[in-house]
């Protein structure tokens, strides 16, 4: 671990100094190796996580495309947010110097992958490729649930690094008993930033450890959330069946092992509400068992489900009796039902239960719905099923949800996180440790960069992005005006 | 304190929902009131801080202009970093939803002003106006060193808020014994972010308190630094006298009470080095005493100076004998001299001494200079005095310094922080608690905003910035291309 962190530190100076083109070549080489059909990644990941092959194939494609997207971002180049304020030598009472500012890499990054995405949020996932794109060396702590998949992905990255002439130490991976190795990595002086995807408990522990350092470092932890879904009256009346089916499919997708799993349902008062909740219960009761990635997660699901079902005002309205081939990892979908006052009184009802279950809250009034929205903690997503009429009669709801969540979805499901420029996969505490950060989409690179201002630095010593002629052809804010023009 | 924090929370929903124009009007009204000659601000600040009138007049103008700059930023509007990825309903294997993302306000901000800038970094300073510009209510904890100035500035803001129809609670100010009230404010559930300018000890204590909350919040603390200045051989030989004069003036400016005060000097080996250090010592020995803002700060200066001078390898090479009218607040400029090995061995030599003193490190080789640069902790600024020949023979130096500092200055002095788009007033720990944040310049607004993504949200429910027609006329990243065009 110490060797990996020190190697990353030693690589930083050379890696940070590389122009964008070789970094982009490195990322494309990683993408090609991940996409290659004969690398054994999908087979190994299937054996280690029990995730079905089509899902892993699409996750593999997503992971490779993500690396390519960051390569494209480097080629385009404007992400560095270059700003130039030209000198005003004749300004009174004192001249203004020449100021040129852009984003530069932050330093070595420790990456902790998730159990539920052995490719896209793991060794070669979004955190790693966005950190490498920013110019930061990476040390990955492999997830113990898929060590072989991790090893194959790490080899692909190391081969790509060699092939494209990256400095030694630009990428390392370590295995080890989870908390002990993780803490040592996060508190290592050579590590300057941490990216994590996983449980609240895990993310909070790393955050605390990093904050207690003599030199605290940023921790970007995405810790999941309950992802509230509001179902408004007119939508309920006109599309109840469709919404119930979409939600049942979203709740059970991947055995509920998505950080955007819709685990909380706020049902507006309506004549159709009882039938809707009953129908959702029937769909979940009929759903097959889902294989979770390991027995510990399935045991935690059962325990959390039982704990919430034991709250007096909560009913276990449905639970699928389906069994899979291995009881230790098969999770039965379920529906819990409660009411507005119970939701207001019991903080636990707004928290995630990791697995194929959702808690339906039957609200008794419009005020109940808005009060529930205002009471929400931070979530990755918040969804509203609504007609135009619904939105008009709940004008406050979307603005409230935009303050509670990183992404607001209308008439869709929160599962399915597009890798795109406009994606924000993050949200206020406790969904993440930094509400400004996204772990998906091109803005993820901004976590690993910081601005530097160059004052009166001669042209020849400036980074290309800040030179008069704008040789990189990027957008720059020149004296307050965004332009690709040379000075 | 509790009432102020709750009032801010209550104001947030209405204030965040305001379009940019009324927020800009609020900021301009604040600026007009600050700029007004008959508000008594400069007189009161002079009485409370002993800063000279011309300095306070220029600080007042800067503070007003800063509020206007943020108003202009809101009018222009592109700062919200709007991004739109259009739906692809026919994409295989699954359609892509419509994604639109922009920055929204983060929540109520607690602001802690500095003692050394009673206007520009205090009640109506950069932290307050950038937070208000972002749409965040503000609660200021007044600095006990200038309570009357604080009260006048707070009244100006409150009058501006009333005149422009802002919601009650959008701004409050509290007085009180510093640490106790400050901690209660930072740990109040209604406060979502903290901005601080001051000492390392003060900033670190608030950072720790915020990190220990059940729901940790970001703390943007600017905690000063030693601001290393490198003087390279050719510059020393050709401009030694000029550099010595500029440095002596910068070290003694405002009695050394600037967070960008050049407190550390790395002098490259050269025949001219001894004469240069001697000349700098002579200039500082001749400099008048400077009045510090209160007796506690002056006592701390004397104590720190004595402690560093007591290090065996350090010589007190010069100290001005000048006395001012009030011994309790008059600080005598000084020069400390040491060598490369001592600088390498003594961490204290790289840390700030708050006041009109600088530590000159006589390096004995080119390697010594680069090793000193590599050993630096984070600083707000790093300066190099160099000719083209110097830069060519020290090609590594500027890239190293860009990794250590928030601003790299060539052939200038670090004091004087322009309020501009390209300014970055921040830097790696321990200069600040977040290397990505600036407290000066338009990018300061980014501390108080977070992205939200709207997925398939109907046009009518979207913020203006994200509507098809682009009614705000801002730059937006549409399908990866920056444009002001409508969709």
Image (cartoon, coloured by chain):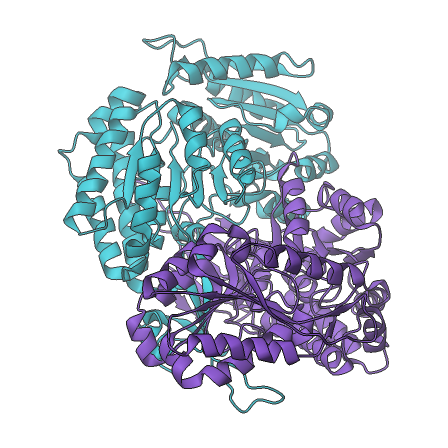
Chain colours: A purple, B cyan
- Asked whether residue B104 is in view, the answer is no
Quadrant housing the N terminus of chain B: top left
Give whichever of B250, B95 is nearer the camera: B95
Is B123 placed above or below A360 here?
A: above
Q: Position of residue B116 (x, y in %)?
A: 38, 28
- Using residue A41 as the reference point, say whether residue B29 is left or right of it: left
Is A52 placed above or below A408 here?
A: below
Pick out the residue farthest to the bottom: B90
Number of dots carrying numbers: 0
Give whichever of B19, B50 is nearer the camera: B19
Quadrant housing the C terminus of chain B: bottom left
Q: Which corner quadrant of the image does residue B182 belong to?
A: top left
Q: Position of residue B58 (x, y in %)?
A: 27, 36
Q: Residue at x 75, y 59 (%)?
A: A299
- Using residue A128 as the reference point, say whether residue A176 is left or right of it: right
Q: Which corner quadrant of the image does residue A40 belong to?
A: bottom right
Q: Position of residue A336 (x, y in %)?
A: 57, 65
Q: Residue at x 25, y 25 (%)?
A: B148
- Asked whether residue B130 is in view, the answer is yes
Give whichever of B452, A308 is nearer the camera: A308
Q: Which corner quadrant of the image does residue A260 belong to?
A: bottom right
Pick out the residue farthest to the left: B38
Q: Residue at x 52, y 70 (%)?
A: A423
Q: Position of residue A85 (x, y in %)?
A: 40, 55
- Using residue A361 as the reference point, say whether residue B64 is left or right of it: left
């Amino acid at each position: 671990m110490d060797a990996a962190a020190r190697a990353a530190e030693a690589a930083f100076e050379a890696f940070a100094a590389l122009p964008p083109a070789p970094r982009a070549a490195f990322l494309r080489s990683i993408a090609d190796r991940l996409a290659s059909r004969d690398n054994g990644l999908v087979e190994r990941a299937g054996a280690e996580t029990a995730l079905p092959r089509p899902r892993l194939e699409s996750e593999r494609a997503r992971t490779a495309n993500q690396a390519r997207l960051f390569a494209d971002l480097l080629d385009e180049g404007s992400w560095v947010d270059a700003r130039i304020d030209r000198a005003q030598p004749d300004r009174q009472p004192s001249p203004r110097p020449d100021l040129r500012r852009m984003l530069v890499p932050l330093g070595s990054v420790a990456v902790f992958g998730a159990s539920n995405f052995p490719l896209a949020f793991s060794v070669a996932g979004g955190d790693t490729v966005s950190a490498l794109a920013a110019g930061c060396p990476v040390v990955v702590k492999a997830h113990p649930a898929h060590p072989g998949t991790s090893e194959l992905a790490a080899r692909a990255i190391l081969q790509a690094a060699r092939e494209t002439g990256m400095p030694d130490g630009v990428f390392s991976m370590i295995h080890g008993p989870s908390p002990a190795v993780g803490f040592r990595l996060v508190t290592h002086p050579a590590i300057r930033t941490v990216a994590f995807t996983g449980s609240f408990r895990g993310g909070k522990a790393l955050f605390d450890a990093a904050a207690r350092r003599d030199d605290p470092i940023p921790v970007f932890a995405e810790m999941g959330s309950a992802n509230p879904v509001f179902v408004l009256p007119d939508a309920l009346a006109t599309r109840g069946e469709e919404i119930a089916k979409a939600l049942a499919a979203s709740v059970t997708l991947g055995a509920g092992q998505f950080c955007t799993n819709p685990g909380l349902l706020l049902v507006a008062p309506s004549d159709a509400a009882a039938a809707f909740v009953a129908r959702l219960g029937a769909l979940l009761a009929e759903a097959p068992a889902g294989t979770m990635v390991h027995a510990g997660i399935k045991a935690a699901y059962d325990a959390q489900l039982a704990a919430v079902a034991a709250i007096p005002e909560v009913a276990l309205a449905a639970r699928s009796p389906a069994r899979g081939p291995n009881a230790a990892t098969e999770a039965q979908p379920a529906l819990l039902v409660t009411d507005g006052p119970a939701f207001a009184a019991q903080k636990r009802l707004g928290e995630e239960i990791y697995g194929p279950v959702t808690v339906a809250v039957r609200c008794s009034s419009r005020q109940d719905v808005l009060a529930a929205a205002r009471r929400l903690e931070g979530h990755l997503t918040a969804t509203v099923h609504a007609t135009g009429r619904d939105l008009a009669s709940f004008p406050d709801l979307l603005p409230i949800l935009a303050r509670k969540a990183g992404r607001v979805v209308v008439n869709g499901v929160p599962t399915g996180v597009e890798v795109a420029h406009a994606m924000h996969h993050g949200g206020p505490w406790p969904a993440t440790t930094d509400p400004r950060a996204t772990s998906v989409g091109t803005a993820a690179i901004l976590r690993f960069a910081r601005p530097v201002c160059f004052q009166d630095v001669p042209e020849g010593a400036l980074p290309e992005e800040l030179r008069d002629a704008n040789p990189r052809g990027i957008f720059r804010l020149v004296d307050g005006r965004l332009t690709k023009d040379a000075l």
